[in-house]
């Protein structure tokens, strides 16, 4: 356990059922910083955030957010206890949407396990700006 990470954290993964979500769950469960990984179906995730125990970190596939009305796309993070947020994107437009969500980090899908662990550690140690992390992860 890293000395800057005082205790393992709970991670909520919001992604459609499939390879991406299963892979994230397996990788995150193997992390020394993660105590519990909870996966939630997209159709139940956003409207019910206040009912969840406050996760420390949310890993969100931005594609899931597109299925919700615009009115439900903001405010859910504060209702969930203001967890840290890593957003997974495919395009520059989705990156912009992630910045609007005030993501702590943005990962371009297809990232390596090493990149995910590096990002996870950076996000859990501090609250870096999404633009700072996404520039590194986009290779710019």
Image (tube, grey):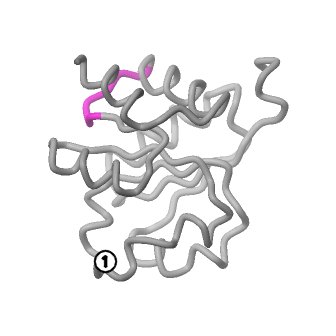
Q: Secondary structure at mark 1?
A: loop
Q: Position of residue 59 (x, y in %)?
A: 47, 48
Q: Magenta: predominant secondary structure element?
A: loop
Classify residue 45 as left or right of residue 79. left
Q: Residue 14's spot in the image, x, y percent?
A: 44, 58
Label 1 sits on residue: 68
User: Is residue 109 shown in magenta?
Assistant: yes
Q: Is residue 111 left or right of residue 92?
A: right
Query: Which quadrant, please, contains the N terminus?
Result: top right
Q: Is residue 22 magenta?
A: no
Is 68 located above or below residue 2 in the figure? below
Query: Which residue appears at 51% of the width and 20% of the height?
Result: 118
Closer-to-camera residue (40/47): 47
Residue at x-position 47% and y-position 35%: 129
Q: Is residue 4 left or right of residue 52?
A: right
Q: How many marks?
A: 1
Q: Quadrant of residue 139?
A: top left
Quarter of the picture holding the C terminus: top left
Q: Residue at x 70, y 25 (%)?
A: 32
User: Percent x, y for residue 96?
Assistant: 24, 49
In the image, residue 114 sits, relative to residue 120, either above or below, namely above
Residue 9, percent from left and from top: 72, 42
Residue segment shown in magenta: 108-113
Residue at (49%, 27%) from the top-left corner? 119
Bin the neighbour count of mark 1 within 10 Å (Cα to Cα): few under 14, some 14-19, many 20 and up. some
Q: Is residue 80 left or right of residue 114?
A: right
């Amino acid at each position: 356990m890293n000395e800057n990470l005082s205790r393992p954290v709970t991670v909520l993964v919001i992604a459609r059922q499939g390879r991406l979500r299963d892979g994230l769950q397996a990788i995150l469960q193997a992390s020394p910083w993660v105590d519990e990984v909870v996966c939630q179906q997209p159709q139940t995730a956003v409207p019910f955030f206040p009912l969840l125990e406050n996760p420390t970190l949310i890993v969100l596939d931005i594609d899931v957010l597109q299925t919700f009305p615009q009115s439900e796309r903001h405010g859910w993070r504060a209702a969930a206890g203001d967890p840290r947020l890593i957003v997974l994107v495919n395009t520059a437009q989705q990156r912009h949407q992630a910045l609007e969500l005030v993501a702590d980090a943005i990962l371009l899908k297809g990232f390596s396990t090493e990149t995910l662990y590096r990002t996870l550690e950076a996000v859990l140690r501090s609250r870096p700006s999404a633009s700072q992390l996404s520039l590194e992860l986009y290779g710019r």
